[in-house]
Image (spheres, rainbow, N blue to C red):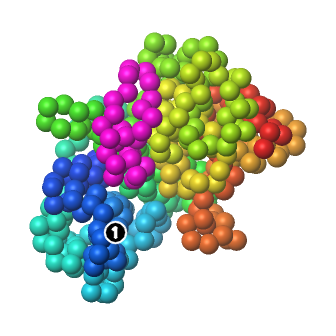
Amino acid sequence: MADLLKLLLRVAEKAANVARVCRKEAPLFQLLVQEKTGVDKNKKFVQDFKTLADVVIQEMIRHDVGAQFPEMIDHIHGEESNKFENGLGESVIVTVCGTEKETAALLATVLDGDQTAATLLAHAIHQDAKLTLTDTGTDDLHIPLSPSDLGIWIDPIDATSQYIEGREEEAAEGRLCPSGLQCALVLIGVYLRATGEPVMGVINQPFNHKDPTGWKGKHFWGVSCGNIKACSVLRPKDRPAETTAAGGPGLSVVMSSSEKQTVKEALAPLCGPDRLMYASGAGYKILCVILGLADVYVLSEGSTFKWDSCGPHALLRALGGGMVDLKECLHSSGSSHCQGGHQDQGELTYHQPHTESTGADHWANQGGLVAYLNCQILHRVIGELKGKF
């Protein structure tokens, strides 16, 4: 399973490279951002090139993982459907082919014969990731799991709107970035098919920082399997206090700017000055908790999905935290307790759909969520929110 983790790190870096190429190469960038009008307006491939970029990344990950672990291929799930209709009304199933030339030919049929864009995209898909894994600490991991017991959730580009808009905002050291390219992430989560427990996660931030040659990424990983807890991020107790914003007076809470006013008002008294913070992208807000840039992430709506939370959830668990269903915690009777650092009820799972829902809502985190590293802080947040909405 250490081999699976290494593979996921590599395919996440390939995905990050595709995301960077789509913004860097002019023919792809124009398809990504332009608003078509007139006779072109109804061409699905143009309207949804951003979705095609997502699908290409998702199918690339599915292809590479399935090639090495064929017993997992039917249990690799993503956000997007891989069925497209081109300008001629032809239905095309997007897959990654055996060769770059074959993939380019397939993509050209989706892109109404745009060979330049198809060739650029296919080259990025088939290019090996340049990722140094010698310093990841994965070599000594012995994880008692079998591929046949596991499923995978993929979010190919989380915070797609921030990715498309492309603002190049920079965050000060120890502070989160409210919006912009830094909020766009590649998320891969591995869960136990029997219980839904998240056991492995990879987060790749394609636009972590910029140097004279362009954008550079950063990756994070975590494993939480029984007594095995390993993570590329330092545990909170091992971090220098000055490296995080979550160490000052009062709690620091990150949420969406569109969060309910009643939730904001309920949590404001717990927070120090300027410590009720806002950021884009569910995955990025969870990453802020992982990195200690915020104590908790609170979301009262069912607007996130299993592909958003599975990978980051595994990192939280590896660090002694977790992610809970907010509604379940608010409506539970009596007090809950921490078991081994985790909340003993309400933890999100990833194996069962909501059968009463349709479409993507099958896999929504319908009760909202709270992402945390410290169980006592979680209980304070739940206590403040009980009875407020």
> Is 373 placed left or right of 26 in the picture?
right
Q: Is residue 54 above or below residue 114?
A: above
Q: Residue at x 80, y 39 (%)?
A: 388
Relative to the observer, which residue lies in front, 313 or 83? 83
x and y, in percent, of residue 253 in the image: 60, 30
Answer whether residue 116 is magenta in the image.
no
The image quarter containing residue 62 is bottom left
In the displayed image of the protein, which residue is found farthest to the front? 38
| Residue drawn where x is 56% and y is 41% of the image | 256
Determine the image quadrant of residue 356.
bottom right
Q: Main secondary structure of the magenta part?
A: loop
> Residue 252: x, y in percent?
59, 25
Answer yes or no: is residue 221 visible: no
Tell me the amino acid under the disc marked 1.
Gln
Q: Which residue is labeled 1 in the image?
A: 47
Image coords of residue 250 (percent x, y): 64, 18
Q: For numbered disc 1, what is the local secondary structure?
A: helix
Task: Name the outermost residue toward the right.
Answer: 334
Q: Residue at x 44, y 24 (%)?
A: 175
Specify few, some or many for label 1: CA neighbours under 10 Å numbering under 14, 14-19, or 20 or more.
some
Position of 69 with respect to 134 (left or right) is: right
* Extent of the magenta region: 159-186
Q: Does 95 appear above or below 274?
A: below
Q: Nearer the viewer, residue 163 or 366?
A: 163
Q: Is residue 210 visible?
A: yes
Question: Residue 143, image x and y in percent?
Answer: 46, 44
Q: Is residue 373 above or below residue 128?
A: above
Q: Is residue 170 covered in magenta?
A: yes
Residue lying at 12% horizontally and 72% vertically, measured from the top left: 115
Residue lying furthest bottom: 89
